[in-house]
Amino acid sequence: MTIPPELAARPVVEKLRAFNPRAVTAAEEFRGQLTLTVPPELIRDIGEFLRDSPELAFHLLTDITAVDRYPVEPRFEILYFLRSMKSGERLRLKAPVSGDQPRLESVVGLWPAADILECEVFDLFGVHFSGHPHLRRVLMPDDWQGHPLRKDYPVEGYR
Amino acid sequence: MAERTAPPPAAAETMVLNVGPQHPSTHGVLRLILELDGETIVRARPDVGYLHTGIEKNAEKLYYSQVIPLTDRIDYLAPLSNNLVYCLAVEKLLALEVPPRAQWIRVLLTELTRLNNHLVWLGTCALELGAMSVFLYCFREREEILKIFELVSGQRMMTSYFRIGGLAVEPPAEFPRQVDRLLKMLPGRFDEYEDLLTENRIWLARTRGVGVLSPEDAIAWGITGPNLRASGIGLDLRKAEPYSGYENFQFEIPVRPEGDVYARYVVRMQEMRQSVRIARQALDGLPAGPVRADAPGIVLPERDKMKTEMEALIYHFKLVVDGFAPPAGEVYAAVESPKGELGCFLVSDGSPRPWRMRWRPPSLLNVQVLSKLLPGHLFADAIAILASVDFVLGEVDR
């Protein structure tokens, strides 16, 4: 996991690393879209910095979702889609989380939009968000067993 | 009815009222849990999930081109916007260029989709507030748009007309004439709706100052599209991040600062006029040429070639049986759908099926913001606010 020099020179990467030297563990650009891998335990601090930094102004959280990389560990990648209201720049944050009791800090306090998005990730992937005011199933019934978007969820036969 | 009172102290005795999931005013199977103090809403919680069909999971088992019919069924009032965002995401993954004629027809048809969506929105919103005739007129005009969808794709609603690399087929010869007739008819009809509503005293009393969303709250709650522009922020992806050749079109972005139900109405009315303007430019400047990219192995070959060329037949067979495998990577594509930013995030592992497809539904965030907008309002105003934010439950639940 590395940060290519051309991406390390990007203002957002420079500012994040100045904020916390551990903030960016990897950076990748594919088809002109920047994805930064961040340590999951820092997600809330990084989010707060990106939102409140006047030059960056990532005020709009458009989406939170997850990708299950089963059977690879760390299994889950939690993705945060941000858009700067100043420059119009888009940024994806990727927080890798282990499949054993997946948990990371909620960002509902930063963006109220995250409420139902985190609930959906919890519902469909079984990732917990500590500090979420009301983590609940939103799409599946309340008494449902299992998390359907996990790759090891059975898709045929008797469950 | 527009006056609001501050929420009463927590000690006051409240009543919990279930609205939906089977209630005509919730525009589908939305359940709203309202805590009422008399007629004033203290707390509101939308409960969704009644239409969950697992489209994101289904997509993981299908070839890239087989996902397109699923996308129609997400937001069934704007099927072509859904087709477009999915095709754009796959094309970005493949770095595939779409011919100009296909891009222009895509712009034309997605603007007609916006008209279709806003007409349904206007009709149902007016119906909720007692203006029944507007509903009938809007559905009359909507039918004309659906006839054009049927003309090009054979389907009124589940179009599946956009394909990876272009369009399914060249539109039939009478397509330009039919669209021309529609675009000539619509502005006069918009004037009729505005005569009925814009200065109507009942309409003003029910909509002005109701459900005010400040620009800061709109951003924090992830609101995009017409609702954001009615709160004074002129963000429109067609201008901010042009796709499918939108940079070649002249149009304005209507913005209103008030953030109330009336502002959302005015923004959408003006957007419909701009959509007609864009569609007119697309129709008049429609470039000649193919409607599908020349990409053997990704785009199906022409039917005629299959009868004369062996390679075309082989490509057709391989594409249908094996699909195609884009490079491994992650892409996000976003379009300005009638309801806001509609996004499609695709993760490819280099196999012919998407490893993960994430649908970023603007409707979900439009529903969520109700818990912010409703408290402090009277129950009757809740219906107006609910109607004004515009959502489709198929897209909320996917």
Image (spheres, coloured by chain):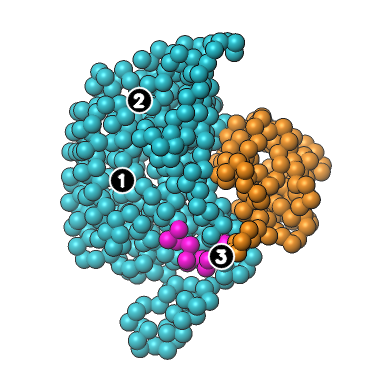
Chain colours: A orange, B cyan
> To which chain does the residue with label 1 belong?
B
Residue A122 in sight = yes
In contact (CB < 8 Å): disc 1 and disc 2: no
Q: Where does the image place residue A130, in percent across and percent down from the top left?
A: 73, 36
Q: Where does the image place residue A68, in percent across and percent down from the top left?
A: 68, 56
In contact (CB < 8 Å): disc 1 and disc 3: no
Q: Which residue is mark 2?
A: B262
Sequence-earlier tag: 1 or 3: 3
Residue B268 in sight = no
Range of magenta residues: B60-70
In this rendering, is residue B53 above or below B14? below
Q: Main secondary structure of the magenta part?
A: helix
Q: Which residue is mark 1?
A: B116
The alpha-carbon separation of the residues under discs 3 and 2 comes to 44 Å
Sequence-earlier tag: 3 or 2: 3
**Residue B61, labelled with which disc?**
3
Instruction: Report the amino acid beneath label 2.
Output: Tyr
Magenta highlight on residue B66: yes
Residue B259 quadrant:
top left
> To which chain does the residue with label 2 belong?
B
**Residue B22, labelled with which disc?**
none
B260 horizontally vs A105: left or right: left
Magenta highlight on residue B274: no
In this rendering, is residue B340 above or below B298? above
